[in-house]
Image: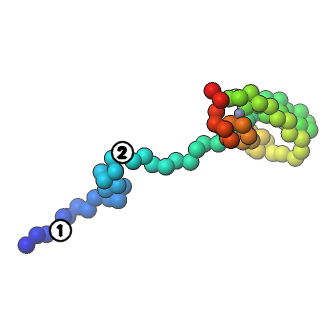
Amino acid sequence: MTTAPSIVPSKAYRQIHMFPDAKRRRVRPVKRMHVVDAGSEYLRFQCARCNATRTYHGPHTITWAKRGIPCPTCNQNGCPQ
Ligand SMILES: [Zn+2]
């Protein structure tokens, strides 16, 4: 008569050992443009990768400005570098 193993491996352990070459899918990180110049009524963003600049006029918060805006070039076609 056989007995069940006392320790059951976890799901993550089994997946790693069943598919050792598989890589976990990850969300591609968003490339963002960051503030290089700020006035009372505008914000100028620049991308560190492709040097694209964008000027934003409108209401904003400091937190939103520090977070940056997604770069349209780098997020569409991949980083040029
Ligand atoms: Zn860019």
- Identify the image quadrant of residue 58: top right
Is 70 positioned to the left or the right of 17 in the image? right
- Residue at numbered disc 2: 21
- Residue at numbered disc 1: 4
How packed mark 1 is, by other alpha carbons closer than 10 Å (few <14, some 14-19, many 20 or more), is few
| Picture layout, residue 29 above or below residue 49 | below
Quarter occupied by the C terminus:
top right
Give 62 or 12, whichever is nearer the viewer: 12
Residue at position x 58%, y 44% in the image: 28
Numbered disc 1: secondary structure: loop
Going by the numbered disc 2, the residue's amino acid type is Asp
Residue at position x 35%, y 55% in the image: 15
Give 28 or 67, whichever is nearer the viewer: 28
Is 74 positioned to the left or the right of 59 in the image? left
Of mark 1 and mark 2, the one earlier in the sequence is: 1
Q: Position of residue 11 (x, y in %)?
A: 35, 59
